Image: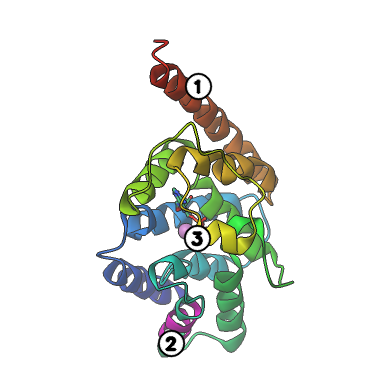
Amino acid sequence: MTKKEVINNTKSFVQKTLKDAEAGHDWFHVLRVYNNAMSILSNETADEFVVALAALLHDIADSKFHNGNEDIGPQVAKSFLEIQSVDEAVLSHVIAIIKNVSYKGGYTASSFHSKELEIVQDADRLDAIGAIGIARTFNFGGYKNNPIYDPQISPNPNQSKEEYKKSKSTTINHFYEKLLLLKDKMNTTTAQKLAEDRHEFMLDYLNQFYKEWNGEL
Ligand code: ADP
Ligand code: NI
């Protein structure tokens, strides 16, 4: 099988697998992350095949939607790539990226690093901020039936991985616990630049939100 065929098979597989996914972690999220990754890659030196496969498979079975099981995503991706007869080196690199891409409060358990991981992580983080990031966050908050905002509940930006995962905080607090922290966590300069406008947009949004909340507009 050619690389192009494997990529096309992967796209179909992901699209089918995520057909009933929460809207912030669906095929369109994956497609945006894939496109972000390809544009970051145009300014970096990295293995395009690994970046493409990892971007496409990074949310194939997110632990948030599988009772916290962090092994299922890498397992599903591995079984799929084995059927595609992908090289062992490519396969293990893609799996390592899937295991390490997630934010989970900014804490990572592993010491795995690669340029390809950096690119996929930045691509995923870009989709968590700006106008799309706002839409995804409110969708997820609604899915969890979390409050939009509560002035009595203050944000906790220094949560541990466990606290972050079980947080029942408000959706506005999620901006302070994650979204506004992402601009300074980008690995590549390309993503750092793209993050700036999206970050400003979120600050403007919050400003307007509080003014309307407080009846100042
Ligand atoms: P990753 O999928 O990279 O591990 P997260 O699990 O932190 O990252 O979240 C991915 C996206 O899901 C966030 O960018 C946000 O849009 C949404 N999300 C996650 N947790 C929350 C939350 N507590 N409140 C609102 N949105 C959330
Ligand atoms: Ni993602």
Quarter holding residue 164: bottom right
Of callouts 1 and 3, the N-terminal one: 3
Would you say the beta carbon of the disc 1 residue lies within 8 angstroms of ligand 1? Answer: no
Instruction: Write the start and end of the magenta stretch as one range.
Output: 74-80
Quarter holding residue 111: bottom right
Q: Looking at the picture, which amino acid does disc 1 mark?
A: Asn
* Residue depicted at 46% across the width and 89% down the height: 82
How far apart marks 2 and 3 lie (CA) works out to 29 Å
How far apart marks 1 and 3 lie (CA) works out to 27 Å
Q: Nearer the viewer, mark 1 or mark 3?
A: 3
On residue 79, the disc is 2
Q: Looking at the picture, which amino acid does disc 3 mark?
A: Lys
122 up-or-down from 47: above or below: above
For the residues bearing labels 2 and 3, Cβ distance under 8 angstroms: no
88 up-or-down from 119: above or below: below
Query: Label 3: how many residues lie within 10 Å, few (<14), some (14-19) or many (20+)?
Result: few
140 sits left or right of 165 in the view: left
Q: In front here: 170 or 21?
A: 170
The percent position of residue 196, horizontal first and vertical second, equals: 61, 33
The percent position of residue 147, horizontal first and vertical second, equals: 38, 42
Helix, strand or loop at label 1? It is: helix
On residue 166, the disc is 3
Q: Quadrant of the C terminus?
A: top left
Residue designated by label 1: 207
Q: Looking at the picture, which amino acid does disc 2 mark?
A: Ser
Q: Quadrant of the N terminus?
A: bottom left
Q: In front here: 33 or 88?
A: 33
* Residue depicted at 53% across the width and 46% down the height: 126
Specify whether residue 46 is in view: no
Q: Residue 154: within the magenta?
A: no
- Main SS, magenta region, reads helix
Of callouts 2 and 3, the N-terminal one: 2
